[in-house]
Amino acid sequence: MGKKFDARNMSVEGYFTVEATLIMPIVLYVCVFIIYTGFYWYDRCLMRQDAYRAALAGSSIYRDDNQKVYNTVADTIARLAEDKYIATDYAVVITVQSKVNVAISGQIAMPFHGLAKLLGKEKWEILENVESKCINPVVFIRMCRMLEDF
């Protein structure tokens, strides 16, 4: 068994304390890094989901002009992204032509400043680009009826 503390003999082995002081910061940094990585992937997944939902909302309406589609996509993304992301900054770019393109980009601060200096980046960047083809509802219904008859 280990030595017991004796007031008369002040020499106590402290190798376990030294090992703990070396290992515990490493374990703590690894745990924090794993948590921040989870935040990064969570935000990335949410941004992709919201971009697809907004693009689908814009491409599913019948349109006379592109401004109506743009307004629908912008309103949808503003409603979906409100106070939802962990990312400190995010931006949305919407383009409407024959397809609705939605790009959401964001940045998450690195957990450790030393790691940021080592990698040369202050923040982790997220960029999600999605597109949805605009289909005229009349043409879509006709195509479905043709498939039904087939």
Image (spheres, rainbow, N blue to C red):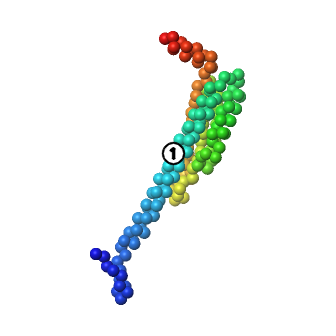
Badge 1 crowding class, 10 Å Cα cut-off, few under 14, some 14 to 19, many 20 or more, is few
**Residue positioned 49% across, 53% down in the render:** 35
For this rendering, which residue is in front, 6 or 37? 6
Which residue is most to the bottom?
Answer: 8
Q: Tell me which residue sits at (49%, 11%) in the image.
A: 150
On the image, the x and y values in percent for residue 2 come to: 30, 76
Q: Secondary structure at mark 1?
A: helix
Q: Is residue 100 above or below residue 1?
A: above
User: Who's the residue at 37% across and 87% down the image?
Assistant: 7
Q: Quadrant of residue 64?
A: top right
Can you say whether 28 is above or below 68 in the image?
Answer: below
Residue 144: give x, y in percent of width and height. Answer: 55, 16
Q: Is residue 117 visible?
A: no
Left or right of 39? Residue 67 is: right
In the picture, measured across the screen, residue 135 lies left or right of residue 9, that is: right
Query: Does residue 30 appear left or right of residue 10 in this picture?
Result: right
* Residue 116 vertical position relative to residue 65 in the rendered view, above or below: below
Residue 14, given in percent of the width and then of the height, sits at: 37, 76
Indicate the quadrant where residue 142 lies. Answer: top right
Return the residue found at the far front: 148
Q: Among all residues in the image, which is located at the extreme top?
A: 149
- Front in this rendered view, residue 98 or 117: 98
Q: Amino acid at mark 1?
A: Trp
Residue, disc 1? 41
